[in-house]
Amino acid sequence: MVFDRLAGIYDATGVEFFRPVARRLLDLVDPRPGVDLLDVGCGRGAVLFPAAERVGPGGTVVGIDIAEPMVRATAAEAAERGLGTVSVRLGDGADPAFPAGSFDVVTASMSAALFPDLPAVAARYARLLRPDGRIGLTGPVPPPSLREWALGPLRVGAVVDAIAPEAVAATHPRIAALLGAHPFGAPGAVADALRAAGFVEVRELHEDLELRAPSAEALVGWTWSNGLRVYWELVEPDRRAAVAAELVRDLTAHAAGGPITATYPVAYVTGRLRPAGGTP
């Protein structure tokens, strides 16, 4: 699994991405002191650690991730930080194994887009929440297709264009499905899934996050340190250098001697369950 190989460099290449997205998500869901929060696809703790500060000693924060090396590394960091209210465990984000009503808040930052049946997942998250519980998800603003996906001057589609679709269809059917239309769901699909699961006050916010890097090569290298690596690994090894060089040229031309930047459009979707008794 690609995320097993990312634990050592995930969110650690000098390009700020997961942490600022996590901070914004926490601002939106606003976990209060004393609440119990579940972070799905916790990675290296971008949501987990600032959430622990917000809920304080009277609350708990549980992180789950499907990648065992990620879980080990994040659990070790939580212990080093002395965060006794934080626990990290191996778990399937599409079907977290917790009793109903275990949490006040569920977050899934840059992980929910990986689940093929989001309506079913949203219903499971609703079951995990207590009355008046809150949910917050983030993901890429859905492009029409991966071939058209661009982070400003950083054209992810150039990597996808270099993938042989027939080979992917035979060996990676889930990724092959992403190569079709609406890889992260049609516009509004996440919000619709939350409403269908019983969430109210569902809001979807799109914001551009600026990515900055010391060089064009560093920004292209960043794409190997997160989920975009999935697509790089599907490109034939002898083609990767040429694709990377193309991306470096695009970024350098766009910078025109200034800072190397790209723009990641992020979708934030939040909602809550009704309080006990059903009163809004």
Image: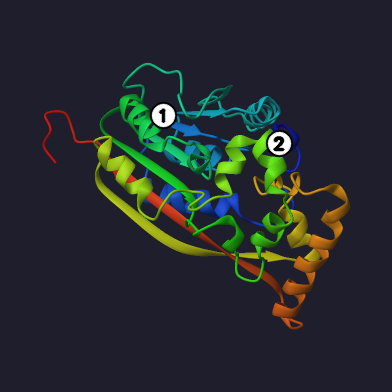
Q: Amino acid at mark 1?
A: Gly
Q: Residue furthest bottom?
A: 256
- Which of the 4 quarters of the picture holds residue 166? top right
Residue density around tag 1, few if under 14, some if 14–19, many if 20 or more, within 10 Å:
many
Q: Quadrant of the C terminus?
A: top left
Query: Dot 2: few (<14), some (14–19), or many (≥20) neighbours within 10 Å?
Result: some
The picture places residue 62, in percent across and down from the top left corner, at: 49, 27
The part of the image, by quadrant, that contains residue 200 is top left
Q: Identify the amino acid type marked 2.
A: Val
At horizontal 71% and vertical 57% (from top left) the residue drawn is: 159
Residue 23 x, y percent position in the rendering = 49, 51
In this view, the residue farthest toward the right is 238
User: What residue did someone put label 1 on?
Assistant: 59
Going by the picture, which residue comes out furthest to the front?
A: 166
Q: Secondary structure at mark 2?
A: helix
Which residue is label 2 attached to? 2
Residue lying at 79% horizontally and 73% vertically, measured from the top left: 249
The percent coordinates of residue 175 (x first, y second) are 61, 41
Query: In this orientation, which residue lies closer to the viewer: 194 or 73?
Result: 194
For the residues labelled 2 and 1, the Cα–Cα distance comes to 32 Å
| Label 1 residue SS | loop
Residue drawn where x is 33% and y is 19% of the image: 100
Q: Is residue 45 above or below residue 146?
A: above
Q: Which mark is drawn over residue 93?
A: none
**Residue 20 lies in quadrant:** bottom right
The answer to whether 199 appears left or right of 209 in the picture is left
